[in-house]
Image (spheres, helix red, strand yellow):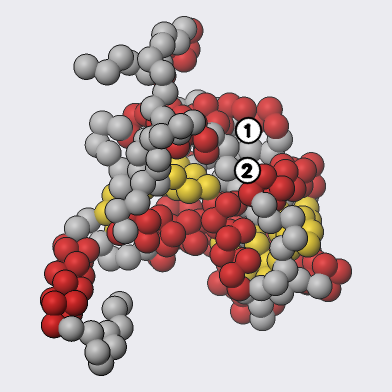
């Protein structure tokens, strides 16, 4: 929505009217990648993304053709990153307007940005930015305690050491989130309440894409901003696309160099430009 001041000239109003009309008529195609290979989780994440997306945004959800059913450690993440690269390369045939990686480890984010000129957002990076706009400090509540180090390293990498006051595991298996029953919600709520008190935080970041369906309930119960990385990444992606902004192809995000890949990765090699 545009808010026009009293002193906006006629040409400005006409320009805004034209841009608004164009944006309303254009269908944005958003590639949503679930880096694990759980079809039920992909469907649940897509449903959450579509719920917050604009009416002219088409969510195209996908998952790798190989890799782990859930991502709960460094080994899993290595294969998930390759799967993300696979899906971004395959999507080049139809050209998404933006890409969202729906795993809190942001696996394959840098590779995905090399492989497309569209904006690519990881849900952890998006969630940290959103939380820092809503509170002076936030806490992350995630699944397995063993993955807390992955989130902590992302906090450091993205420069949020001063805003993130703690990362807390619940030891809920990722695939158990597919049920999303009261016991699961209760465990996450308990961990979040402890984090808010111990860390003196003002907001909670949900540390798994599989928690997207629980965000509304937790927000009501906790009474503080609860940030779902999938939702904010979708809205940030829409904004960047609408502004005509994409991934820079100057420097380290330049298109991958042409080379031959071998074995099972043979189809993922980058071809020479024609």
Q: Which residue is mark 2?
A: 105
Q: Nearer the viewer, residue 37 or 95?
A: 95
Please identify the quarter of the rendering in which residue 26 is found: bottom left
Left or right: residue 254 versus residue 180 is: left
State the residue lying farthest toward the right: 198
User: Residues under labels 2 and 1: Cα distance?
Assistant: 8 Å
State which quadrant residue 180 falls in: bottom right
Q: Which mark is residue 226?
A: none
Seen in the image, is 69 located left or right of residue 197?
Answer: left
Q: Choose the circle earlier in sequence order: 2 or 1.
A: 1
Q: Is residue 194 visible?
A: no
Residue 156 seen from this side: yes
- Identified at 61% across, 38% down, the residue is 70
Q: Which residue is mark 1?
A: 77
Placement of 212 over or under 115, stated as above or below: below
Q: Residue 55 appears at what percent x and percent y? A: 28, 65
Q: How many marks?
A: 2
Q: Position of residue 100 (x, y in %)?
A: 45, 47
- Residue 15, position as x, y percentages in the image: 16, 72
Q: Quadrant of the C terminus?
A: top left
Crowd rating for badge 2 (residues with CA inside 10 Å; few <14, some 14–19, many 20+): many
Circles 2, 1 touching at the beta carbon (< 8 Å): yes
């Amino acid at each position: 929505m545009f808010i026009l001041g009293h002193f906006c000239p006629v040409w400005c109003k006409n320009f805004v009217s034209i841009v608004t009309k164009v944006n309303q008529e254009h269908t944005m195609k958003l590639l949503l990648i679930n880096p694990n290979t759980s079809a039920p989780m992909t469907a649940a994440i897509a449903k959450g993304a579509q719920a917050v997306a604009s009416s002219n945004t088409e969510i195209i959800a996908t998952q790798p053709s190989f890799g782990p059913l859930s991502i709960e450690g460094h080994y899993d993440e290595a294969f998930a990153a390759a799967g993300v690269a696979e899906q971004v390369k395959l999507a080049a045939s139809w050209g998404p307007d933006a890409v969202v990686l729906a795993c809190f480890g942001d696996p394959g984010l840098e590779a995905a940005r090399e492989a497309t000129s569209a904006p690519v957002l990881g849900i952890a990076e998006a969630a940290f930015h959103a939380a820092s706009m809503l509170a002076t400090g936030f806490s992350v509540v995630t699944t397995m305690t063993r993955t807390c180090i992955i989130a902590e390293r992302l906090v450091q990498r993205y420069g949020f050491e001063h805003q993130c006051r703690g990362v807390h595991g619940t030891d809920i298996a990722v695939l158990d989130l597919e049920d999303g029953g009261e016991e699961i919600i209760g465990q996450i709520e308990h961990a979040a309440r402890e984090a808010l008190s111990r860390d003196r935080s003002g907001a909670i970041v949900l540390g798994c894409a599989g928690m997207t369906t629980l965000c509304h309930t937790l927000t009501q119960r906790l009474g503080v901003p609860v940030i779902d990385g999938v939702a904010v990444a979708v809205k940030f992606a829409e904004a960047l696309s609408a502004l005509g902004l994409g991934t820079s192809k100057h420097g380290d995000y330049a298109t991958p160099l042409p080379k031959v890949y071998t074995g099972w990765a043979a189809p993922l090699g980058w071809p020479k430009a024609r």
